[in-house]
Amino acid sequence: MIISHIEHIGIAVKNIEESLPYYENVLGFKCYAIEEVEDQKVKTAFLKVGETKLELLEPTAEDSPIASFLENKGPGIHHIAFAVEDGVANALAECKSQKVRLIDFAPRKGAEGLNIAFLNPRSTQGVLTELCEK
Ligand code: CO
């Protein structure tokens, strides 16, 4: 696969509204989009940091994966997302052939209409890894 850059870093927060003043007023980033991803049971807020983004993730239900993450680990870095230039489907096939465990076996729609897929952290040195393409 060909990875061009870090597309975004996902950060679990309890409350987006309460988290934004730090990112906007202290670090000086601008939140340009807030979006709910229903099948993931999260609300997301995006801020640009050069070519990379921060994706703040707030759970919208008790059974949201972000809710259990917050419960187990507290707020903090949740995942890293790489921009794949030659397609997520292709990258997944390559991962599979190298015995990388997958969470998503096919690309699906994530925030911002990107095709995304997650790899299992047990196969990625403990880092929840998302692959995405425009
Ligand atoms: Co993400």
Image (cartoon, helix red, strand yellow):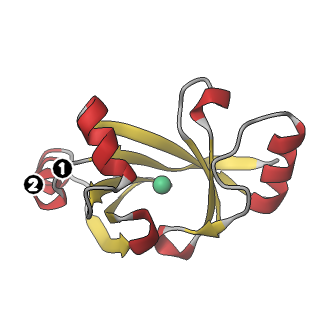
> What amino acid does circle 1 point to?
Lys
| SS of the residue under disc 1 | loop
Task: Using the image, determine if residue 48 lies above or below residue 69.
Answer: below
Neighbour tally class for label 2: few under 14, some 14-19, many 20 plus, Cα within 10 Å: few
Residues at discs 1 and 2 in contact (Cβ within 8 Å) = yes
Image location of residue 18, percent across then percent down: 9, 54
Image location of residue 22, percent across then percent down: 14, 47
- Marks 1 and 2 sit apart, C-alpha to C-alpha, by 8 Å
Neighbour tally class for label 1: few under 14, some 14-19, many 20 plus, Cα within 10 Å: some
Give whichever of 59, 20 is nearer the camera. Answer: 59
- Whether label 1 lies within 8 Å of ligand 1 gets the answer no
Image location of residue 110, percent across then percent down: 52, 67
Give whichever of 124, 32 is nearer the camera. Answer: 124
Quarter location, residue 21? bottom left
Numbered circle sitting on residue 18: 2
Task: Using the image, determine if residue 51 lies above or below residue 114.
Answer: above
Instruction: Name the residue tied to disc 1.
Output: 14
Task: Please say whether residue 45 is visible from this viewpoint.
Answer: yes
Quarter location, residue 60? bottom left
* Horizontal relation, residue 121 to residue 57: left or right: right
Task: Name the residue: 54% across, 76% down.
Answer: 113
| SS of the residue under disc 2 | helix
Task: Using the image, determine if residue 31 lies above or below residue 6.
Answer: below
Look at discs 1 and 2 and give the one toward the viewer: 1
